[in-house]
Amino acid sequence: MTDPTAAETRDEPQRSLTLPFAPDHPIASTFEGERSEARRAINDRPQTGPLPTWSLMLSVVLKQGRWLLGKPGSPLLNPDLVVKTRNVKSPVPITTKITKVAIPMRPERLIPDMTEDEVKGTVPGEWVDVHPHRDTSKPAERVVLYLHGGAYVTGSAATHRTMLWRLAKHAHARILAIDYRLAPETTFPAAVFDALCAYLYLIDPPAGQPKYEPHQISFGGDSAGGGLATALLLYCRDHDIPMPGAVATLSPWMDVSLSMPAWAINGPYDYLPNFLDDIKGLSETRSFFYIKTNDDLSHPYISPINAVEDPAKPLPPMLIQVGDAERIRDDGIVFSECKFPNSPIRVELYEDRPHVFQLMAVFDSFSRHGIERLGGFIREQTGTKIDGRPVVEHKAVRILAKPGYPEQEVPDVLGIVHDAARKLIERGEWKHDLEDTSFFIVKKNATIRRRVKTALAAAEPKSFGNVVVAAMAAAAAQADAAAEVVAATQAAADEIADTEAAIVAVTKPTEAEAETKPAETEAETKPAETAAVAAVVQVAVTEADAANELVDAEAETEIKPAVTEIQAKIAEVEAKVASAEAKVAAEAEGKPAAAAE
């Protein structure tokens, strides 16, 4: 076995910001053809909640959560209130044993960008025990290293106790939950280092502590903790540290740039606030407290969705649980299907559930079922016995909120991401830029739009929206081309209207002329040039109407000629107007019309 305390052997991990997509790629079929029942159900969901499977209690909790986290001064966005939310302790049954532990840091494993002072001291944590483990000097059958969620700014091991004791019960495992360092006091990579120290505490412990084999250990985490657990897994892989027996994550936050379509389309159902709407306290080059600059957004240990699969170092079995109505739904899907398609990863989508729905197990039986499945996966894939473990297939399933909680296979799960992006484009809520293949949200409020766009500018094209966009560039190109035609046609119509007004202004006789001249018909008083101009205007209007019919054209080459012709007609109209103005000016000075021309 490789020495887990050996010095680093690899430089910064390789980043992948593009989708491995080609017409003959296996995932291409997810965008075309017959859609699975699960994909249709998710795509046809109402635009607002509550959803049909929600209980009254769940609806109330989600509404209150949106109000609390979305109001000004939200704890997740206001650093002054963050510390208060870290001290909340959730209750556990009196039979659950909580044991505090101080895990020594490992200065020899210092990660680049950290100082020596940052790797001194201990990492606080606690053991959560439900099943009796009387002799703590010996290792238990299995252990879960759990990393709590909270957007890297809040939460603690204590805030998650109510969920963790249930996980310990169903996994038949001890749980070691740590309080890794949080932002804004510290930034990346302090949290990764703390998690690494906790793992080494298990597989290479100090004297007097039990030693666990990697196959006895599972990494676990929710939200930011799920992303951190995945980052720790990738760090171990990249630095020749033995990987654990399994990884089980709940709604893992794998794309810190928040550029997946679900972040926007699932906003009405989830309790998470839209961080992109409120970036106060951050500079234009730093979008989140956890990072130093937006250059970090694409780092695989910050956004694991940018990692690269290594066939020589396959990942251990992974389970990713997400609510199919949550904002971070797409992170796990794209990580599994686009970046690690050959790894043993099982994605479970829970019908109509929000972010980290397992935290609602106190009142929601469906959430408890999710924890049971999570515990069962850990129980099957880790422990002292290696032989006879079930093989984890790479696939996605949807768990339905019906009696018995039946499963639906989702062979076209990446198509769910595709459908969400297309729907947002059709609503006009997203705009796609083909120059750098990136998404940005189109806000109605110009001020918010400018702030969001500026804050994310430094991250482009690192935003992982690139990944999905590359797969749907053809469809997005058609939508953008159509939008351009509409804009060009509208501009042409506006200019024609202005031209007609100008013609009337320069050819209309003054009040004095109207009194001295006998009444004549409009046809007799209008100069021949004006009649010609009117004819040209009519032609241009006809061409503009014809251009409108090209909105649905699939090829850009069919659109440009119409726009070019409209522009030519406008130029012709402008020339006629100039001629008419010169004629009027000449007549006003008493010069012959021919001389003026």
Image (cartoon, rainbow, N blue to C red):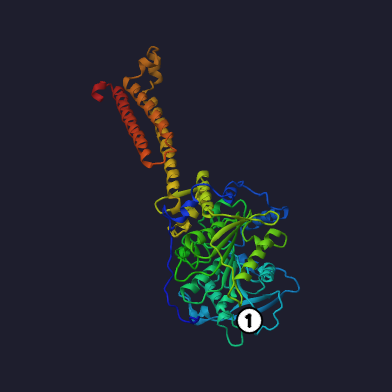
Question: Can I make out residue 192 in this image?
Answer: yes
Q: Nearer the viewer, residue 585 or 163?
A: 163
Which residue is most to the top?
518
Question: Can I make out residue 70 in this image?
Answer: no
Q: Position of residue 2 (x, y in %)?
A: 48, 81
Q: Residue at x 68, y 84 (%)?
A: 135
Q: Nearer the viewer, residue 9 or 452?
A: 9
Instruction: Rate crowding at label 1 as few (under 14), some (14 to 19) or many (20 or more) other CA atoms within 10 Å.
Output: some
Q: Position of residue 142 (x, y in %)?
A: 63, 76
Which residue is most to the front?
388
Which residue is most to the left?
595
Which residue is most to the bottom?
207
- The answer to which quarter of the image holds residue 519 is top left
Q: Position of residue 201 (x, y in %)?
A: 57, 80
Q: Which residue is mark 1?
A: 139
Image height of 80 relative to 2, above or below? above
Image height of 474 relative to 122, above or below? above
Image height of 191 relative to 35, above or below? below
Left or right of 131 in this view: 232: left
Q: Give the amino acid at mark 1.
A: Pro
Q: Position of residue 17 (x, y in %)?
A: 43, 60
- The answer to which quarter of the image holds residue 592 is top left
Q: Secondary structure at mark 1?
A: loop
Q: How many marks?
A: 1
Tell me the quadrant of the picture where the C terminus can be found: top left
